[in-house]
Amino acid sequence: MGQFGYSNPIKVPQRAAARPNAGAAVKTIPFDYVFQFALQGSPTNKVQDVVEISAEGVFVALSVGYSLATDERRTPRRFGPAVSEGGILEAVSDNRPLADVTLGEIAAGLEKIGADLTRGFRLNPDAANLFASGLPLSSIAQGSLDQVFELGSVAAEEVSFLYSIDAGATGREYQNKAIHNIAGLGIANGDRPFRPFAKPIMFELRSFIRIQIEEISGPPGTLFIVLQGYKMLGAGRIPV
């Protein structure tokens, strides 16, 4: 009878037969496998990446780490106030100095580039002299006015997502449900650059690993997840 209560007429080979030859030396080298995901900054967006273990040998994963490179190109970094003139957002005959623009006009300028006040803003250092000059808005070229302020940076640690890891060749999953990134990996600010596994995980050569991501919140950018470990060169199967 088989392990699960049914007959199994196929003779299962002993795992010992898969061991490398006793005389064959197994060399180990440090190695990392990198997974890459394009995050859109959209809740419920799902992405995955699959990495195949090379034919060099067994890969042993010791820890996992991650980082996020935010994509500032999705939204222009610099903007100017949208000054109202007769109900039309433009700066034509306004004789106020630049320092007198209102928060509402700054918020309207942010809206024109698809942003809002939640990201914050600051004065563009290159426009500091223009801001202090006291020149009326009507004498400032529109191109210069559009460069007066800068968006605040979105911190990488604001990213929030669920992730799961499985060995695609065997269907083995390494969690009972998707894990929140802070619970499993920590915050992406460098305080905890990696998380050691409770026990090293071995992956046979030519098998593949899949990581699935579901976005919850955060900025768009490129997410990197790294399995850190080593390769056992010359080991065709996981030693037993």
Image (cartoon, helix red, strand yellow):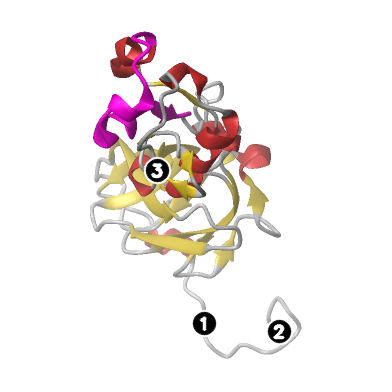
Quarter in which the N terminus is drawn: bottom right
Q: Disc 3 and disc 2: Cα gap in Å?
A: 83 Å
Q: Amino acid at mark 1?
A: Lys
3 or 2: mark nearer the eye: 3
Q: Within 10 angstroms of label 2, few (less than 14), some, or many (20 or more) residues?
A: few
Q: At 33% from the left edge and 29% from the top edge, which residue is drawn? A: 138
Q: Disc 1 and disc 2: Cα gap in Å?
A: 12 Å
In percent of width and height, residue 100 lies at 51, 20
Q: State the residue in front, 199 or 131.
A: 131
In percent of width and height, residue 203 lies at 43, 54
In percent of width and height, residue 82 lies at 45, 39
| Location of mark 1 (residue) | 11
| Location of mark 3 (residue) | 90
| Location of mark 2 (residue) | 1
Range of magenta residues? 132-152
Secondary element at image label 1: loop
Q: Residue furthest right?
A: 5
Q: Earlier in the sequence, mark 1 or mark 2?
A: 2
Q: Amino acid at mark 2?
A: Met
Q: Amino acid at mark 3?
A: Glu
